[in-house]
Image: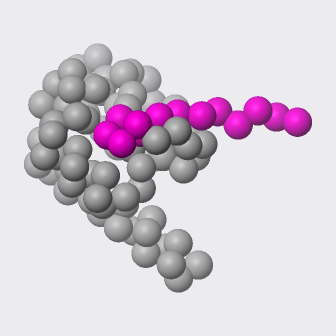
Amino acid sequence: MKKIPQRSCAICRAQKNKSELLRIVKNKENEIKVDTIGKEPGRGAYICYSMECLEKGIKTKKLEKALECKIKEETYEQIKNIISNKIGGDVIG
């Protein structure tokens, strides 16, 4: 039986399966990207597919602390879109 990797949400600290979390990565050029495939090189932080978790993370800057750099508003908007699409997809599907 294959072991499922576990990761912690950078904001709420909940432990979940890696596939249940969204990975945000900072590469060598200090660019922040949303890592949808989970294989991008660089420092990664995971967050729940939850708007409440993201809003709390923006307010407390926990995601910025985990990645050790400032995150642009456009990146937060991209994360919001991905989370809302995932949440919407789960409700319909």
Is residue 65 visible to us here? yes
Q: Position of residue 42 (x, y in %)?
A: 38, 21
Q: Is residue 55 left or right of residue 20?
A: left
Please tell me whether residue 10 belongs to the stretch shown in magenta: yes
Farthest residue to the bottom: give it: 92
Q: Locate the N terminus and report the quarter of the image it occupies.
A: top right
Residue 88, above or below 69 = below
Farthest residue to the top: give it: 28
Residue 9, above or below 42 = below
Q: Is residue 58 left or right of residue 41?
A: left
The region drawn magenta spans 1-13
Instruction: Give the residue at x 47% y 34%.
Output: 8
Instruction: Give the residue at x 76% y 32%.
Output: 3
Decide which of 66, 76 is in the foreground and name it.
Answer: 66
Decide which of 73, 31 is in the foreground and name it.
Answer: 73
Residue 44, above or below 1 = above
Instruction: Give the residue at x 25% y 35%.
Output: 63
> Where, by quadrant of the figure, is residue 68 drawn?
top left
Q: Position of residue 93 (x, y in %)?
A: 59, 78
